[in-house]
Amino acid sequence: MPRRTSLTHSVCVRSVGSAARPIGPAAGYILSFAALAAAIGLRWLLDPLMGDTLPLVTLFGAVAAAIWLSGLTAAAIVTIVGYLVTAYFFSAPRGELGLSIPANLVGFAAYLFTCSLIIAIGAALRAARSREAESREVLRVTLRSIGDAVIATDVAGNVTYLNAVAETLTGWSEREAMGQPLETVFRIVDEQTRERAANPAERVLREGVVVGLANHTVLLRRDGQECPIDDSAAPIKDERGVVSGCVLTFRDVTAQRQADRDNQAQLLTARRLASIVESSELAVIAKNLDGVIEAWNAAAERLFGYTAAQAVGRHISLVIPQERLAEEDQIIATLKAGRRVEHFETERVRADGQRVAVSLTVSPIRDDDGNVIGASKIVRDITRERQAEAERNRLITLIESSTDFIAVFDLDAVPIFMNRSGLALAGLDNLWAARRVTAWDFFFPEDQARIRDELFPRVLRSGHAEIEARFRHFKTGEARWMAYKLLALRDEAGEPIAIGTVSQDITLRKKLEDNLRSLAAALSATDKRKDEFLATLAHELRGPLAPLANVLELWKRTGNRQQLQQARDTMERQLGQLVRLVDDLLDLSRVTHDRLELRKGRVELKTVIEHATEACRPSIDKRQQRLSLTVPEEPCPLHADAARLAQVFANLLNNSSKYTDSGGEISLTAQRDGSAIVISVRDTGIGIPADKLESVFDMFTQVGSTLDRSQGGLGIGLTLVKRLVGLHGGSVEAHSAGPGKGSEFVVRLPLEEAPLPAPEATAPQTETRRRKILVVDDNTDTAESMSKLLQFAGHAAVAVHDGASAIEAAEKHKPEVVLLDIGLPKMDGHEVCRRLRDLPRGKELVVIAVTGWGHGDEQRKWRDAGFDAHLVKPARFEALAALLSSLERPSPAAHADQP
């Protein structure tokens, strides 16, 4: 710390401590005349001794006193007045001035000369004294007004002076301190050791040199308070260099010490900040308002790929993409306005040209006057954050768009999060509504205790659990089956903090499982019925085949006309039985696949029943059973397919006959019931067990389980009945009192209330015209037998057995009608038909499809291929003859889709 120089060495300790006070003008005159009076009085006292000798000798002292005390005027007055008095009283001749005497005149001149010298010397001394007083006053004012404290001592080290600052710092007034030893007034100790510091005045007085106070010196005030001080002590010397005392100058450095501490703290803070900035993972860049880089830390080097030496001094556009340079102007404008730029997300470019996503925080740098002179920029690489945010957004999107129930519960089972699907599934409007319930409130009351007391504790123990349970909809109460999967969410210490769930709605799966179980049971029962049906079918087919084989052998071995007639009748009956079995199968297939087309019209119930009983009469009569009919006399019109409705009642009558022993009774009763007609078919047969009443209409179902009960059918008759009645808008029910007590089938059909139309006149039958017919079938027996039958009927028929031969025969024989099998080898019937249509007369041909397939999309196929009509194998000759007789001329699109 700098030391001040000592005060002027010419300052006298005494004069500084006790300077003479100047007197006023009046007092000076009074004292001057008093001195004159004293001088005159002294001469008067000496007159006896001196006589006339040296009468003016005592006046010189009075003149000197007047010039010193009052000045030139008083001295002149004292000089003149003193001469006049002493000359008059003490010079000869006495009693007069005697200036006329030469000796007196010379004495007067010598007197004036001496007084003038005295006055001149006195005036000089007076002027010197005045200057000294002025200097002393300046020194006094200076010492009083300077900011430092000043203490002066004499050579003994006692205090001779304190200025006001010293009084304040020491707590001693100048009057109290005067004469006190310096160490009493000026007590100092070392700030750190607290030991008493050496008195500086001792060395100054001993060695006569300037002494600086030790650093960290503390002044102990009179009241015990402390204040740190510094500066120096210096000797007081006269003009000869003799030390006459000591002067101490010191000052309170409390504020300076605090400022020093603050500066040191700031310096330390700055160093720490510099270290932090340099070691920071964030890039820190300083620049001026022109954008020139002034600081560039290590993180900036790593982020941008430029070293500090490469970056400092260059413009910040070094790392700004060209298209984003305008951002820098906006940032500078914001800084000049004194505002920070907070978390500004943008892109910057590295030294290798790679773009990097960053977040900028830019703060203004100010000078001491608060003016913005630059900017401090913190740059954070947010590439990973962007990627994490994108991943988080994708995860959120996935969670929110998921159809699963996704939720997080706290340890009290209160929902923290729930996705949209979860809220919708539970019937909750939002998360706030969900937070008013607990996890187990999602379940039905009977399941809540198990979820709360077993499932959740197990999750917390083992970390996960899974259960299938029913959720309840909070608004509707609807139950939803859930695969409820729970997972414990843990903190870094492994302690559970929440429970998460990703659960699936398995209601549909549960229903499918139930349906599959039911379907499996049904399939099992159907499979069992199918096996029974196949056994029955084999039995039923063997029934007619056995007599047919026997008759064929009989035909080979006999020529008896009566036996041949009986054989023909047997073959006709058995062949009819085979056709009936196949027809039932075809009808069932059509009904099952909704391909049966009803030809509805207005029909009379009585007529339908008559046709049905006529068809069943042979079987009933054969079993010697009694059939009774009760039908209303009034008309019962129906809107129905007469043939199919007759088939319904024939099947019911046949069913009753089949399951009723010989001699039993069968009754058919019909009666009106409002707008419907109810027909009951009752028998006295074996009856139906109660557990079979619902399944008796199922396919392949027969009440009896032995083959002897199945010889009359395949077990599909009642299935056809139910399907056909349903197609007519009616219903059928089965009733029975039990096994051995007969059965009853009740059919309910809607009546047609409008009157029946008048019967149409029957068109006269036209004679069948002889036609040229080509028969095409890969089964030689079928083709040849059909050809012979057509020839017996008067037609010219030719048979071939493949597609190529059919086209060749059509070109050669030029037929009018072609009976074409669909299932031909190499070239099927559809292709053959297309090629026949391409022949010169192909458009005039009547092409009839003959196939064993009567369902599926066969009808569409044969129409698309160009066929005019369709017959299902085995095609009855009567149906073919009727079709041929209806052809007045070859015409496309004729329909004969019937067996």
Image (cartoon, rainbow, N blue to C red):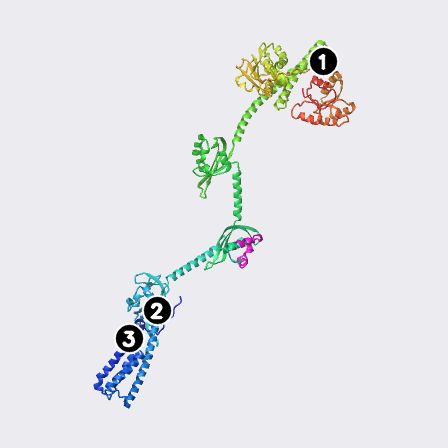
The crowd level at tag 3 (other Cα within 10 Å; few <14, some 14-19, many 20+) is: few
Instruction: For the C terminus, give its image quadrant.
Output: top right
Instruction: Residue 314: say if magenta.
Output: yes
Residue type at the position of mark 1: Lys
Find residue 121 and report its horizontal and vertical position in percent. 32, 81
Circle 2: element type: helix
Taking the spot 65% from the left edge, 24% from the top edge, the residue there is 855
Above or below, comparing residue 6 to residue 502 in the picture: below
User: x%, y% of residue 243?
Assistant: 33, 74
Q: Crowding near pointer 2: few (<14 within 10 Å), some, many (20+)?
A: many
Q: Is residue 752 left or right of residue 821?
A: left
Whether residue 660 is visible here, answered yes or no, is no
The amino acid marked with disc number 2 is Leu
Residue nearest the viewer, comparing 41 with 817 = 41
The stretch of residues the image draws in magenta is: 305-330
Q: Within 10 Å of the Cα at label 1, are there few (<14), some (14-19), or many (20+) other Cα atoms?
A: few
Q: Please give the name of the residue rendered at 22% of the width and 83% of the height, measured from the top-left corner.
A: 44
